[in-house]
Image (cartoon, helix red, strand yellow):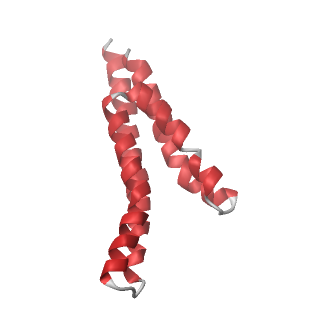
Amino acid sequence: MGHDGAMSRHFLLAARILSIFSVLVPALLALGVLQSGASPQNMLVGLLIQLTPAMVLGLLVTVAWHAPLPGGFILVLVSGIPLLLLPLPFPANFMFAAPMLLAGALFIAGGLSKS
């Protein structure tokens, strides 16, 4: 039992670190709107719009943090959204999707090894 518990902790720790990274990257990219030279009101609106995906991902990561198995499945499903919606070449889209996909898989592995 101790070995499975340690493995579960390692999976969940790796998933948490990777999922935090997956939320911070879009949040940091959203800060580019502050350099647009627009009015402060327009910059604030732009910032809120640009931060919406990071806020949604943060909420989903919170779910996965507290319920690794269902949260991991949700993260795996959500990781496909950049592949479908972003008008970038596949490698660039995959760069956005891969960390969340891996984090979801690690949450699932941690949830399965925990039970």
- What percent of the width, then of the height, locates residue 1? 33, 11
Q: What is the quadrant of residue 90 in the picture?
A: bottom right
Q: Along the horizontal axis of the image, is 8 left or right of 103?
A: left
The quadrant in which residue 107 appears is top left
Q: Residue furthest bottom?
A: 37
Q: Position of residue 14 (x, y in %)?
A: 39, 39
Q: Is residue 21 visible?
A: no
Residue sitting nearer the eye, 52 or 100: 52
Residue at 54 percent of width and 44 percent of height: 79
Q: Nearer the viewer, residue 1 or 72?
A: 72
Task: Name the residue at 55% across, 47% down.
Answer: 98
Picture layout, residue 22 above or below residue 60: below
Q: How many marks?
A: 0
The percent coordinates of residue 101 (x first, y second) are 53, 41
**Measuring 40% from the left and 23% from the top, which residue is drawn there?**
111
Most distant residue in the right direction: 89
| Quarter of the image that includes the C terminus | top left
Say which residue appears at 39% left-offset and 88% top-offset.
37
- Considering only vertical position in the picture, is 36 above or below 65? below
Looking at the image, residue 78 lies above or below residue 50: above
Say whether residue 17 is visible: yes
